[in-house]
Image (cartoon, rainbow, N blue to C red):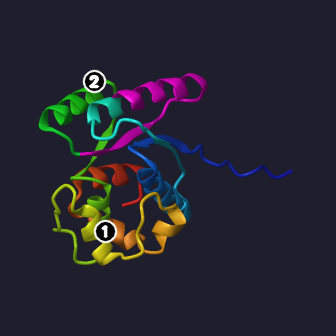
């Protein structure tokens, strides 16, 4: 009688973000991880409401993490996508995350569309001001719209594009290295 092969347990990862756009990007990361055969499970959550307040989003993420860990195993990696807010709120969010075991705050400067812009060819150094990110992204990706699915994002953003962004996005790069994707 032959034995069944042992399948490694998937590493549980909490990934929170402000809304559906970050959730779609998280799903793209999960899809790419599956395609590479990584044994990870991204538990992706939208943390709305709370836009514009990184501290409130970290608080909401912590509450959700505690609820989920009561009924499931503990997350091995915890990360949150956050738009850059006021200096005071950013410092408060960072301190709260550090005190409570959040491994990665992936800062989107100034927002998610600007982060996506830095995935586009020859756009890594582009830093549009708040309120201009969507317009800048649409010049590079006319078909982009908020809250795209992983499949839709994957038509434009590949593993190579993620590598480009990781060259200038330190917090994203650190998280994806830990996941094993870069």
Name the residue that disc number 1 marks: 119
* Front residue (pair 138, 6): 138
Residue drawn 34% across and 54% down? 177
Residue 133 lies in the magenta stretch: no
Pinpoint residue 85: horizontal percent, then vertical percent: 20, 41
* Front residue (pair 83, 38): 83
Q: Residues within 10 Å of mark 1 (few under 14, many from 20)?
A: many
Residue 164 visible to an observer of this rendering: no
Name the residue that disc number 2 marks: 99
Residue drawn 35% across and 27% down? 59
Secondary element at tag 1: loop
Q: Nearer the viewer, mark 1 or mark 2?
A: 1
Residue drawn 19% across and 36% down? 90
Horizontal side, residue 133 vs residue 59: left or right: left
Q: Give the magenta-colored segment's residue range.
A: 59-83
Residue 64 lies in the magenta stretch: yes
Give the answer, above or below, for where 40 lies relative to 164: above
Secondary element at tag 2: helix
Q: What is the distance, in whole Å, between disc 1 and disc 2 at their CAs?
A: 31 Å
Residue drawn 22% across and 77% down? 122
């Amino acid at each position: 009688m032959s034995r069944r092969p042992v399948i490694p347990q998937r590493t549980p990862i909490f990934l929170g973000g402000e809304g559906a756009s970050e959730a779609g990007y998280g799903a793209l990361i999960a899809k790419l991880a599956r395609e590479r055969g990584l044994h990870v499970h991204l538990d992706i959550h939208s943390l709305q409401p709370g836009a514009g307040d990184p501290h409130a989003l970290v608080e909401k993420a912590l509450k959700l993490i505690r609820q989920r860990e009561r009924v499931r195993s503990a997350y091995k990696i915890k990360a949150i996508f956050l738009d850059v807010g006021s200096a005071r709120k950013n410092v408060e969010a960072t301190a709260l995350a550090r005190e409570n075991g959040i491994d990665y705050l992936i800062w989107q400067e100034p927002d998610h569309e600007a982060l996506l812009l830095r995935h586009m060819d020859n756009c890594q150094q582009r830093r549009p001001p708040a309120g201009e990110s969507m317009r800048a992204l649409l010049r590079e990706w006319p078909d982009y719209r908020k809250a795209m699915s992983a499949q839709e994002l994957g038509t434009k953003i590949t593993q190579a594009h993620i590598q480009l962004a990781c060259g200038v996005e330190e917090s994203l790069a650190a998280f994806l290295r830990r996941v094993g994707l870069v």
